[in-house]
Image: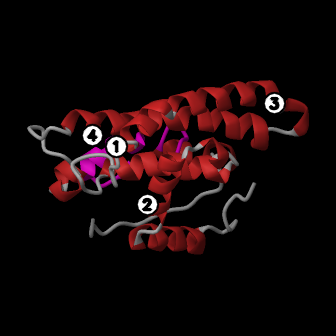
Amino acid sequence: MGIEYRLNVMPFPPRFTQSEYLETNPLGTIPFFDDGISQMTESSAICQYLVDVYNKPEFGIAVNAPDYGHYLNFLHQSDTTLTFPLAIILRYRHLEPDDRKLPQVAEGYIRWFSARLRWLEQHLSTGRLFLCGNKFTVADIAVGYALHFATIIGLKEHFNSDVSSYLTRLTARTAFKRAMKKGVELDPFKSLVL
């Protein structure tokens, strides 16, 4: 978007490793956004805020556009429908100590995640390159994050060919590669590899 920013990287989860972070964000969650005007913790809301407040309509869909409903739905579906089960899978498959891992819980949420991909699969089966308005938007960023997260925790085999091709298009973007490089440069733990 061309907006100046400062990125802080902390060990995950920060509420356990950096208790002073709770003074900044009482939830102790990431991301946390603060532009001196608003403080926000919800990824999708942050995306929409950047489009609206920083006047970046090229990354959104106008309210009178035919795809506006799809845009809002995918933007919010990314966190509530796709990323939520992935967080549970990550916890009970990878992060908990061995004696507290719950494979049956993780498997149940893998089934949930796979079933929740159906809306995206159907939408992409029409040959769309991006989700809405024939252009790249913050909805693609949000859904792309969920899909990328799923690949990190070993769930890429649950994607059909349309979803796989879509993720390949997103991760081939120069901005995605630049963001990944910056994240690795700033990550003192050189990213969680599972």
Name above or below for residue 39 compared with residue 27: below
Tell me, yes or no, whether the two marked residues, 3 and 2, touch with CB atoms within 8 Å: no
Residue 83 placement, left or right of 43? right
Mark drawn on residue 103: 3
Residue 18 shows in this picture: no
Q: Earlier in the sequence, mark 4 or mark 1?
A: 4
Q: Which image quadrant is residue 160 in?
A: top right
Looking at the image, is mark 4 or mark 1 nearer the viewer? 1
Q: CA distance from mark 1 to mark 2?
A: 17 Å
Residue 3's x, y, as percent? 27, 67
Looking at the image, is mark 3 or mark 1 nearer the viewer? 1
Give the residue type at disc 4.
Tyr
Give the residue type at disc 3.
Pro
Mark drawn on residue 98: none
Q: Give the residues drawn in magenta, as a range.
A: 25-50
Nearest the camera: 129 or 71?
129
The answer to whether residue 40 is magenta is yes
Residue at 65% over, 53% down: 152
How crowded is the residue under tag 3: few (<14 C-alpha within 10 Å), some, or many (20+)? few
Tell me, yes or no, whether the two marked residues, 4 and 2, touch with CB atoms within 8 Å: no
Residue 110 shows in this picture: yes
Residue 43's x, y, as percent? 41, 44
Q: Which image quadrant is residue 63 in?
A: top left
Q: Which residue is mark 2?
A: 170
Q: Earlier in the sequence, mark 3 or mark 2?
A: 3
How crowded is the residue under tag 2: few (<14 C-alpha within 10 Å), some, or many (20+)? many
Q: CA distance from mark 4 to mark 1?
A: 16 Å
Give the residue type at disc 1.
Thr
